[in-house]
Image: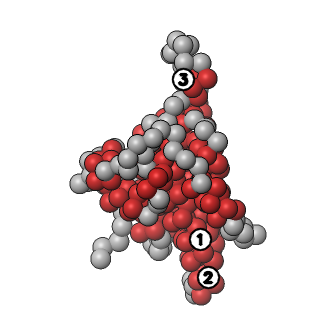
Amino acid sequence: MMKKLPAFFLCLLVFITSIPPLMGGNAINIAETCKQAPNYDECVWALETTPPDLQSDHRGLAVSSLMAAMDNASKTAEKLRDTMDDESDVFIQQCLNDCYDHYVDVVQQMEGALAIVSFDGTSDQIKNLVLAAIADIEACESTFKEQPGHKSVLTRENGEMYKLCSNALAFVKQLPAYTEKHNPTAPTEQTPQTGGQAQETNQENAAPAQTSNQTPSPVQKPAP
């Protein structure tokens, strides 16, 4: 069954933009700030399309990047919903239907992450939602490979979405960790990784960590 695209994020956006920054200060230098992001151009776009008062602290940068990712996912989902029935290839049509569901999941994951940020949440709580969104985008791209002879028709959209999520993840990691926020004097302990932790580590490492001039994504964009 096709999932319904949630409309909650519009109300959430109004709520987020009404919250004053945690730390006072002037608007950031977008060009300099985006050098911290793995995907420079997408970072600049995200910060230029969100209110300047959200850009004065780490939380504001996380909110701006999450909002950009959510907006992109919402628009892609709406486009898929309106056009996938016009596809004549039955397999591609099913892939588009599956990708629609994945993009709806991404919107919901970004909603959840934004809600946590808005209520002064921590990077530990938000990071998994962003990683889950990245996994959904990769699953969408992989869907087209299940039948030989077919190519993804969403490589460009998936690549762009991956970059936005990777930027969001980079800024989310700048937020205080849960253990630091609630017990700042507690010593850091080294513990063996469980299977779930190892999987999360692998997903994080999969996110590109390159300079602003090189931004490889997990999917290759089609040649212009």
Residue 218 shown left or right of residue 133 in the figure:
left
**Which one is nearer the viewer's eye here, 19 or 147?**
19
Query: How far, Cα to Cα, is label 3 from label 1?
Result: 37 Å
* Residue located beneath label 2 in the image: 82
| Residue positioned 63% across, 72% down in the render | 97
Secondary structure under tag 3 reads helix
Residue 224 lies in what quarter of the image?
bottom left
Q: Amino acid at mark 1?
A: Ala
Estimate the x, y position of residue 117 in percent, counting from the top left: 59, 44
- The tag on residue 77 is 1
Estimate the x, y position of residue 52 in percent, counting from the top left: 43, 56
Residue 195 lies in what quarter of the image?
top right
| Residue positioned 48% across, 51% down in the render | 54
Q: Is residue 216 visible?
A: no
Q: Amino acid at mark 3?
A: Glu
Residue extending farthest right = 1
Residue 91 lies in what quarter of the image?
bottom right
**Which one is nearer the viewer's eye here, 182 or 108?**
182
- The tag on residue 16 is none
- The tag on residue 180 is 3
Q: Earlier in the sequence, mark 1 or mark 2?
A: 1
| Mark 3 nearby-residue class (10 Å; few <14, some 14–19, many ≥20) | few
Quadrant where the N terminus sits is bottom right
Secondary structure under tag 2 reads helix
Estimate the x, y position of residue 8 in percent, counting from the top left: 70, 62
Q: Is residue 8 above or below residue 223?
A: above
Q: How is the image coloured?
A: secondary structure
